[in-house]
Every structure is written in C-alpha cells, then in structure tokens.
Amino acid sequence: MNSILENPIYITSISTLLGVAMTLFFTNRRERNKFVLDNKYKEYLELRSFYIDQIASLEKIKRLTKYGESYKDLIDEMSSLNARAGLLGSEAVNKKMHVISDMLYLWSSTYKKGLPKSIGNSGYAVQSNMDIPFLEKAKELEPELDVEIIQLNEIMKTELASMKKNIR
C-alpha cells in the first residue's frame, strides 16, 4: 500500500491548501494593519481639528473682547469644545487650557472694565479716567496670556507630531 505522501495528487492538494492558507493569512494581516492605520489616521485628524478649533476659539474670544462684543455666539461653541476636551485632549493640554481659561477670564474682565461706556442708545461712548487703570492692567496681562497660548500651541504640535510619527 502506497503512502499518502507518495501519491502526487495528495501532495499537490496539500501544497495548494497550504498556499491558499498562507495567502489568506497574509492578506488578512495586511488588511488588519491597513484598518489599524486608517483608524489611527482618523484619530489624528480628529485631534488636529479639535486643537485647531480650540486655538481659534481663544483668538476669537480675544478679538470679541477687544471689540467690546458679547460672547453670546460662543456659548454653543465653547460647550462643544469643553466636551471634546474631556474626551480628546491630553492631560497636558487640559491643564494648560485651565491655566489659560483663568488668565483669559482675568484679562477679558479687566479689559472690558476699561472700555468706554456707552451712553444709552445714542451710539456714543465715554471713557473716563477711572477706565484707564483697567486698560493698563489688561495690557500687562495680555503678553502673559499670549505666552500661555503659545505654550499650549507647542504642546499640541508636539503631541500631533508624535501621533503622526506613530501612524507610519
């Protein structure tokens, strides 16, 4: 009786099955790696978008403050950013945002106290001598605030660069 391994049909069948199994194994592995990379890239893009929105909102708050405008339009935007910060932001970014938030509140409230006061609905405003110390204090605080925002931006850039490096 011939051994199964001596029969050419069995040898061909076994080698074909091994070839198919290896092809499936490596194809699945490649697809799984591509899926993981795609997910990492999507996470990177989402975090980058969040960081851009966060820096833009800080700049918008500063601009609105300088023009004496209301923050009413920012309420929904800030709620969304705060929620995203809790989910996406790193501990370092969230700590820095807390510092910036406190500084931004102090600067903006001081700055607004120094703005000219409107006279009824006349469209005119008057600035008194009592407003000037507030503007001077706000001018002292603003460079410190700007430094904190620059540091936040650097933390974000470093995190994004590290994340992008890990995608490859």
Image: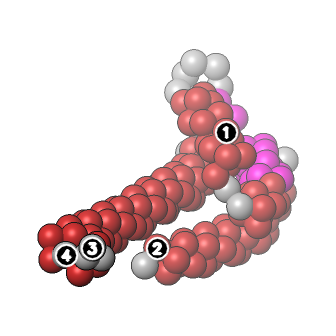
Mark 2 burial class by Cα count in 10 Å: few <14, some 14-19, many 20+: few
Secondary structure category for the residue under label 1: helix
Q: Amino acid at mark 4?
A: Asn
Residue under label 4 = 7
Q: Which is in the foreground here, disc 3 or disc 2?
A: 3
Mark 2 and mark 1 residues within 8 Å of each other at the beta carbon: no
Mark 1 and mark 4 residues within 8 Å of each other at the beta carbon: no
Between discs 2 and 1, the one toward the N terminus: 1
Q: Which mark is residue 1?
A: 3
Residue 118 picture quarter: top right
Q: Amino acid at mark 2?
A: Ile
The percent coordinates of residue 127 (x first, y second) are 70, 44
Could you tell whether 131 is left or right of 50 in the image? right
Q: Amino acid at mark 1?
A: Ala
Residue under label 1 = 83
**Residue bounds of the magenta highlight:** 101-118
Whether residue 112 is visible to the viewer of this picture, yes or no, is: yes
